[in-house]
Image: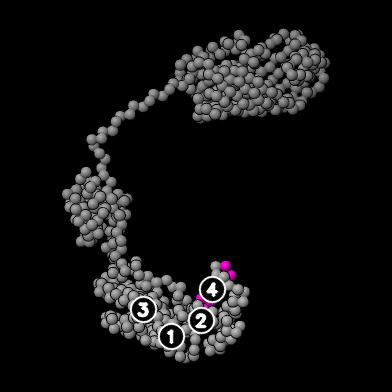
């Protein structure tokens, strides 16, 4: 390290002293390799974020001051730079980029690695500017000093005048050209290490004063009356807003929840002992009676569709389907006298061609996808059967063509697998309505206000339905959070006695 560099570094260190700014946000450095060349230099770094620093490097070599000296390396260099540190303590590795400018007068100087051959025997005087990138590593020596090693490469452009000798040589012309310049640096750096943060003193929480309990409140279920309760286990029930009149394009067997009552072949007399009729009829009667006995719900429509198979004369089957529907209607009326004529929607579905076509189509699909094994002849016959149903409008002629198809083989399969299910009264569904549960709506709106901590607003709404036991837990929560604790405890107890699980939990928390 040359004398001038040492002096500059000491002046800077003395001026910084022990200021906090110097301790962790500012560093001063000197390039030892640059010193060896006889060039005093100094660099600075300022932290601009936890991982970034801005810096400035400068070097100035004024000698030889005698212009008659043959060997010259007079120059001035300034290089701003930006560094990114992989560690936020100005330690370990970093990478960066810099720009540099120099004004120089160089002659009869031999640089290492055979660089810059022009100045070995000539003198070049001018300026250069460039851009570089570098990688560095830092090693801490003690609390105040560390070493930095850097390697890098710069590119730039120089414009200068070239002379034959160092002082009096003849002017040889311009020396303008791009260049590459390697960077090899060994810095000694002053930067006081950051003091370790003291561990915070944690004051134990006073466990003798527990935090206030978090009270539980949930929305209540809408009271849909007896019909709504029965609907959960009886899909035959549907709200009146789902009702639609019957037409013969509907595929009833795929409408979930409908009940069916079966009839013997070619008969319209309803027998409880035939197939599963007894259980089905008892369910229909029981459901209808329970809803009619409830003041909050009512039967609005009982829809019955009578059906017959496609076998036989069309006129006979139409009458048979109508008689079957009427037989079921009369049975329900006998068992539930309150079921007036106006409640029934009785439709004659006639021959169940839409049902049959859908059954055949499903069978074809299963055969085509391999779910059901079938030979090609049967599959072709069922496809032709669908074609006949779609193309033949005369129902009598349609049945005849199906019977004649492929010697009657497809019709035998249809009769064996599908027609048996069509010999029934068809579809039956009960549609209901109920009195709107305005109390539940109010309670649930107030519950939302409680969850938003708008207790006064919630309390005002709950006062309007406090006669409904479903409101008592929410009312108690609102009272408790508005300071009315005795009244709140009273409503918590009442709600708990009614079986409200939230109220029991809240009482447990408050009395713990």
Quick check: marks 2 and 3 in contact, CB under 8 Å? no
Q: Which quadrant is home to the C terminus?
A: top left
- Front: mark 4 or 2: 2
The front one of 131 and 85 is 85
The secondary structure type at the circle numbered 3 is helix
Q: Which residues are magenta?
A: 357-370
Viewer-closest of 349 and 400: 400
Q: Give the class, few, some or many, for how many residues have Cα within 10 Å of label 1's Cα (few <14, many ≥20).
A: few
Can you identify the residue that label 2 sits on? Answer: 415
Q: Which residue is mark 4?
A: 363
Q: Residues within 10 Å of mark 4 (few under 14, many from 20)?
A: some
- Alpha carbon of mark 4 to alpha carbon of mark 2: how far? 13 Å
Residue 361 on the magenta segment = yes
Label at residue 347: none
Q: Residue at x 58, y 23 (%)?
A: 137
Identify the residue position indicated by label 3 in the image.
277
Q: Which secondary structure class fits the magenta region best?
A: helix
Question: Callout 4: helix, strand or loop?
Answer: helix
Q: Which residue is mark 1?
A: 265
Specify which label sits upstream in the sequence, 2 or 1.
1
Q: Quadrant location of residue 255?
A: bottom left
Q: Marks 3 and 1: in contact by CB < 8 Å?
A: no
x, y percent for residue 442: 28, 60
Q: Is residue 2 visible?
A: yes
Residue found at x 51% / y 14%:
13
Q: Position of residue 503 (x, y in %)?
A: 24, 53
Q: Please tell me whether residue 131 is drawn above or below residue 213 in the rendered image.
A: above
Task: Tell me, yes or no, whether the two marked residues, 2 and 1, touch with CB atoms within 8 Å.
Answer: no
Q: Earlier in the sequence, mark 3 or mark 4?
A: 3
Question: Separation of disc 1 and disc 4 at Cα?
Answer: 24 Å
Q: Nearer the viewer, residue 154 or 388?
A: 388
């Amino acid at each position: 390290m040359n004398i001038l560099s040492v002096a500059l570094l000491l002046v800077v260190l003395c001026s910084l002293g022990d200021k906090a700014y110097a301790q962790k946000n500012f560093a001063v450095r000197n390039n030892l390799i640059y010193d060896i060349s006889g060039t005093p230099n100094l660099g600075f770094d300022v932290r601009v974020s936890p991982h970034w620093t801005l810096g400035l490097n400068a070097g100035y070599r004024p000698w030889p001051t005698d212009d008659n000296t043959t060997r010259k390396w007079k120059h001035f260099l300034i290089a701003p730079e930006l560094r990114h540190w992989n560690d936020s303590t100005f330690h370990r590795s970093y990478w960066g980029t810099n720009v540099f400018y120099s004004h120089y007068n160089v002659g009869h100087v031999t640089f290492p690695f055979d660089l810059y051959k022009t100045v070995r025997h000539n003198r070049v005087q001018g300026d250069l500017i460039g851009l570089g990138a570098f990688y560095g590593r830092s090693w801490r020596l003690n609390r105040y000093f560390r070493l930095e090693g850097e390697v890098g490469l710069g590119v730039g452009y120089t414009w200068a005048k070239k002379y034959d000798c160092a002082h009096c040589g003849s002017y040889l012309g311009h020396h303008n050209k791009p260049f590459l310049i390697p960077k090899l640096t060994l810095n000694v750096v002053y930067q006081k290490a950051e003091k370790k943060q003291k561990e915070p003193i944690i004051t134990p929480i006073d466990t003798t004063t527990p935090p206030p309990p978090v009270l539980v409140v949930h929305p209540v279920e809408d009271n849909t009356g007896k019909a709504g309760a029965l609907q959960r286990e009886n899909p035959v029930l549907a709200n009146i807003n789902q009702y639609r009149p019957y037409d013969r394009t509907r595929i009833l067997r795929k409408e979930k929840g409908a009940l069916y009552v079966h009839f013997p072949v070619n008969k319209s007399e309803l027998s409880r002992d035939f197939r599963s009729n007894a259980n089905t009829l008892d369910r229909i009667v029981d459901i209808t009676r329970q809803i009619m006995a409830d003041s909050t719900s009512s039967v609005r429509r009982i829809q019955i569709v009578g059906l017959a198979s496609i076998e036989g004369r069309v006129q006979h089957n139409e009458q048979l389907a109508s008689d079957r529907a009427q037989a079921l209607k009369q049975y329900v009326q006998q068992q539930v006298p309150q079921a007036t004529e106006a409640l029934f929607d009785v439709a004659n579905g006639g021959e169940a061609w839409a049902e049959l076509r859908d059954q055949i189509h499903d069978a074809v699909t299963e055969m085509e996808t391999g779910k059901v094994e079938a030979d090609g002849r049967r599959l072709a016959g069922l496809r032709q059967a669908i074609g006949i149903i779609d193309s033949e409008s005369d129902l009598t002629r349609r049945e005849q063509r199906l019977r004649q198809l492929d010697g009657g083989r497809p019709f035998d399969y249809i009769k064996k697998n599908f027609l048996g299910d069509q010999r029934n009264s068809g579809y039956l569904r009960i549609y209901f309505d109920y009195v709107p549960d305005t109390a539940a709506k109010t309670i649930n709106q107030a519950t939302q206000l409680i969850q938003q901590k708008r207790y006064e607003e919630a309390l005002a709404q709950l006062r309007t339905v406090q006669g409904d036991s479903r409101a008592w837990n929410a009312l108690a929560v609102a009272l408790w959070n508005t300071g009315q604790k005795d009244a709140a405890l009273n409503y918590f107890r009442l709600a708990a006695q009614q079986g409200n699980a939230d109220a029991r939990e809240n009482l447990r928390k408050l009395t713990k």
